Each structure stands twice: as structure tokens, then as C-alpha cells.
Image (cartoon, rainbow, N blue to C red):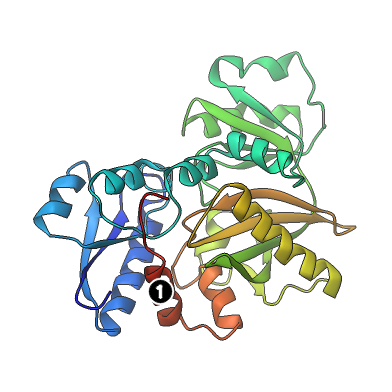
Amino acid sequence: MIGKKIGVLMGGISAEREISLKSGAAVAESLIRQGYIVCPIDVNPEIALTLRQENVDVAFIALHGRHGEDGIIQGLLEMMQIPYTGSGVLASALGMDKAQSRKLFIASGLATPASLLLIETEKSIFKTEPLPFGYPAVVKPISEGSSVGVTIVEGPDGMAAALNEAFRFGPKILVEQYIAGYEVHVGILDQAALGAIEIRPQTSFYDYTAKYVKGMSEHIFPAKLPPNIYQEMLALGLKAHLALGCSGYSRADFILDRAYKPYLLEVNTLPGMTETSLLPEIARGVGISFDQLVEKILTTASFGK
């Protein structure tokens, strides 16, 4: 990659724009420190023209959320024959759609919380129908990350407001069983599980504030789990990564109940690369510096996956 021009794609137009800008800035600074030719690009509808004008050889995708993590930018880059980091079009699209990815997870033998897919025209259903898995419940958009639009609902009275919040981000949402327990995230790099980290948020769950405000969550690496459970989590994280057909790197998010039964929530095909992000923290925990992580991800860039 030395001598090639690396376009670091960041920003974009999703609800996670600000986090993406931080991820992109961290990646660009790392690549510059390592002697690469870097072109930071704030992605907008003119991205194809910008990529051509800048003569970008390789794209390091630091986008999060829709129009960046969902296969759209990956498809454009393949049409332009520009190698890129992260997963391909199909894996990216599946990973971003929580409803579709769960079908694959279940087919692969991975447990997920009980859930209902709801379209906006059906949001009055809970006025007449009880939840099959009871309360509390989690209401979330199917195609957003960083816990954007997510609400934990304690009872029927809170459902209407939670549905309205989730539907702000798209016409389909998930209503899922709430599982109290341990939040564990498994980092994957180059088709191998790096490690598992436990998160203890100061908020009611690992929400946007807990993720991106320093001091709002406790990160424990390696996760304090029984040794056999820890090894099982590494295996399940890699299994989830492979079930979607991911490549390069990813992060699998789990909740374990009090008996240590794991439930897979989602796979992030472009996990955050900020100072508080989990994949860089997992990598540091196994002796991989941030610069080494960034360079390793860059070397996995390809297209047509």
C-alpha cells in the first residue's frame, strides 16, 4: 500500500455522522503517522466525482450507519474498481438490517432474543395485542447503529413514545425481548477472534451516551467470564462474522443472561475506531497498537467480495 493514495471515507449523512468523523480522523492520523499518502474525504452525494478527482487508489471506510455501512458505498466502490476495507456489499447490507441478519443467525444455530418485526402502519397493534414475550422490551430501528433510536420500555404505557422514536429512523423496527445480564462484545480481525470485552454502562443500557462519553461505561478486558464461557464467546463471535459472510474485521455484540446463556444482538461490519471504541481497545488488550490495527485493516482491502 505504500505509494498508493488512501481515501479515508468518513462523515456521511447517517445519524452516526459525528462518530464517523471521529473514527475517520483517528484512522487518517494513524495512516499519516505511518507514512501513507492519505486523503480524508467527508462523504456526500458527490462522492463518486470526488474519488475520481482525488485519484484514490484504496478506500478505508470509516463510515457508520446507513449509506456507509449498508452496502451502498461498497457497491459504488466496486463499480469504480477501488479496493476498500471491511465487508462486501451483501454482508454489509445484511449486517445493517437487524431483521434479515437474525434470520441468518438463527439458521446458523446462533441464539437471538425473541423479537417482532413491525412496520409503521402496524404501530397501533400493541393497543390491542400483548407482547408475546412480555415487558420490559427493547424497541429499536432495524437499520441504525450506536443505539440510535433505541428505548427500553418497562410497560405498555411507554410503548407509544418508544415506537414513535424508533420510527423516526425508518419504516421498519424491531421490538425484542429484554434480557438482563452481561454485555459482551467480540472483536474479529482477519477472520480470527481477538478477544471479548465486557461493558458495564452507567446508563440503563449501553446507549449512545454510554458508548461515546468518557466515564459513562466501565470496560473490562478480558471479559470476566468463566474460562469455558469466554472461549465459547470467541467461537460464537467468529461464527456470527462468518454467518453473514463478513471479511476484514467486525464486532459481534452479545447479551448473556445471568446463567451465562449468550444471545447475539448484531454484528457491526464497520465497528467504531474512536478513542472510546471497543475494537481498538480489544486489540490493545492483546498487544496490537492502534496503528498496527489500522494498518492490518488496510492490508485486507479488496473488492468483489
Q: How many marks?
A: 1
The answer to whether residue 260 is left or right of residue 30 is right
Q: Quadrant of residue 160?
A: top right
Q: Is residue 84 visible?
A: yes
Q: Residue at the location (82% across, 32% down)? A: 133
The residue at the far right in this view is: 259
Q: Is residue 298 above or below residue 134?
A: below
Q: Is residue 207 above or below residue 300?
A: above
Indicate the quadrant containing the N terminus: top left, top right, bottom left or bottom right: bottom left
Q: Is residue 230 above or below residue 144?
A: below
Q: Residue at the location (20% across, 47% down)? A: 47
The residue at the far front in this view is: 304
In the image, residue 294 lies at what x, y percent? 40, 74
Q: Residue at the location (64% across, 64% down)? A: 186
In the image, residue 36 lies at what x, y percent? 24, 78
The answer to whether residue 37 is left or right of residue 147 is left
Q: Which residue is mark 1?
A: 294
In the image, residue 275 lies at what x, y percent? 46, 73
Nearest to the observer: residue 39 or residue 177: 39
In the image, residue 124 lies at what x, y percent? 64, 16
Q: Is residue 122 above or below residue 80?
A: above
The amino acid pointed to by label 1 is Val
The answer to whether residue 130 is left or right of residue 139 is right
The answer to whether residue 220 is left or right of residue 170 is right
Mark 1, Cα crowd under 10 Å, few <14 / some 14-19 / many 20+, is many
Nearest to the observer: residue 172 or residue 129: 172
